[in-house]
Amino acid sequence: MKRTDTIIIGGGQAGLAMSRCLTDEGIDHIVLERGRVAERWRSERWDSLRLLSPKWHTRLPGFRYQGADRDGFMTMPELISYFERYARSFSAPVQDETTVLGVERADGGYLVRTDQGDWEAPNVVVATGHCDVPFVPKAAVGLSPDVHQVVPSRYKNPDQLPNGGVLVVGASASGIQLAQEIHRSGRPVTLAVGRHTRIPRRYRGRDIAWWMEASGLLAERAERSFSLESARRQPSLQLVGTPDHRTVDLGVLQDDGIRLTGRLESTDGRRVRFRDDLRHNLDAAEDKLDRLLGRIDAFVDETIMGADAPERRPPIVTTDAPSELELGDAGISTVLWATGYRRRYRWLHVPVLNIQGEIIHDAGVTPAAGFYALGLNFQRTRKSSFIDGVGDDARFVADHIAQRFHRSSIAA
Ligand SMILES: Cc1cc2nc3c(=O)[nH]c(=O)nc-3n(C[C@H](O)[C@H](O)[C@H](O)COP(=O)(O)OP(=O)(O)OC[C@H]3O[C@@H](n4cnc5c(N)ncnc54)[C@H](O)[C@@H]3O)c2cc1C
């Protein structure tokens, strides 16, 4: 049995940021990672993916991008080497190739069982990722076995797909990027569009990430949101990071020749039905976009800062969306489920999960003393699950842990 003060589970950006903050506090700790540092960016992303955050927008505690291409977007190899350099910069105590199999209460703290032996500590931080396991709707079960099904974390490039057309389900960041890539490879693509967040890459002469940060939108506190639960379930932004800084929205995809439909409702063998809600979903996204850009405009007016005149792409006009498709007749051989992610904590035996299986927490602090979460969507602010946002939350959790030690040393 090995002992330390804090066990961090997961060696992605959240686990590393946490490790850096505990190092700064002088608190002994270990990062247990089942693969290698930044494992998900190594093994669960597609080949062509670039970050949708600009390079300057990848700041971590004590570390930032130092190159000349601040406004560019990192490829996966660049990002992995960025995280590796970060871990080396403060000699992060990462024990890789170590899978956590169980966490339970023990005398004075927690017992963490792994496939490389057991650990004990008074504090545990779960940093296993908001985008943990791909969510696939129940409708997938009704599809005929001869339809190939794939999720973004298993998709690498169009060449791995069987011949034929592709139905992409979900029009958030992953869905729009993969729909465009697959269509450009010469396959017909249909895109089923549910709730989504339309957003331009650039606005009034600057990258949208710059505006979202400068206007205070990204730092907006969770407790200020109208409904925290719905804020935490917001779909990812319809953004893509490319060297030409282009906007990819549903209008662009439709002009390319991608067919749009409403939300996928049900499947029966090779028959797939869609809701008649495409117009409604597009209008709702347009309203959300109005509010976002209105807020940026108000910020420009209030601060009297120099900015280009407002400009925006037109609302999306749709042609008739099919309500039903027979996949064989439509030449579709693959369904790609870009329908978001869930968290699965099968190894967690501390009573901190709600009925949906999510960790109950307030700003990452759970009801179990010394037990924390990091990297969750809207954990403390809108940017909590972003690379650039996790650092503030890690400092907050590290302070909490430091105060626990301080209190217990006074009590002793
Ligand atoms: C396709 C995609 C693109 C994204 N693009 C951006 C972007 O451009 N900008 C941005 O800011 N954010 C982006 N995000 C969001 C976010 O930054 C990522 O999800 C990021 O991976 C989250 O980092 P994390 O450290 O919280 O979790 P993860 O990166 O998921 O790290 C969790 C780690 O925990 C490990 N782990 C899990 N279970 C165990 C276990 N039982 N035992 C030991 N280790 C375990 C995993 O191997 C993994 O390394 C993107 C997300 C996705 C899915």
Image: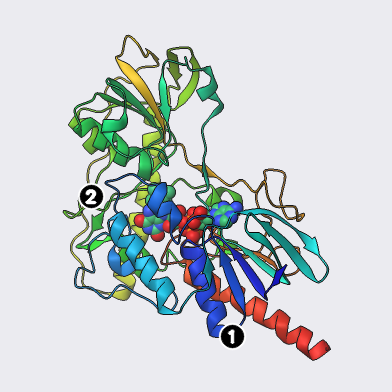
Q: Identify residue for label 1.
A: 26
- Would residue 281 be found to the left or right of residue 227 on screen? left
Outermost residue to the top: 329
Distance (Cα) linking label 2 and label 1: 49 Å
Where does the image place residue 87, in percent across and percent down from the top left?
43, 72
The C terminus is located in which quarter? bottom right
Q: How many residues crowd around disc 1 within 10 Å: few (fewer than 14), some, or many (20 or more)?
A: few
- Would residue 8 be found to the left or right of residue 292 on screen? right
Q: Quadrant of residue 287?
A: top left
Q: Residue shown at 44%/52% (left/top)? A: 40
Outermost residue to the left: 244
Q: Is residue 91 above or below residue 136?
A: below
Q: Is residue 153 above or below residue 214?
A: above
Dot 2 amino acid type:
Arg
Label 2 with label 1: CB-CB less than 8 Å: no
Q: Is residue 258 above or below residue 224?
A: above
Instruction: Please tell me whether mark 1 sits on a helix, a strand or a loop.
Output: loop
Q: Nearer the viewer, residue 301 or 262?
A: 262
Q: Residue shown at 26%/32% (left/top)? A: 159
Q: Is residue 215 above or below residue 266?
A: below
Q: Which numbered disc, 2 or 1, marks the residue closer to the eye?
A: 1
The N terminus is located in which quarter? bottom right
Q: How many labels were placed on the picture?
A: 2
- Would residue 149 be found to the left or right of residue 204 on screen? right
Mark 2 CB within 8 Å of ligand 1: no
Dot 1 amino acid type:
Gly
Where does the image place residue 300, in percent across and percent down from the top left?
29, 68
Q: Identify residue for label 2.
A: 312
Where does the image place residue 395, in percent across and percent down from the top left?
54, 76
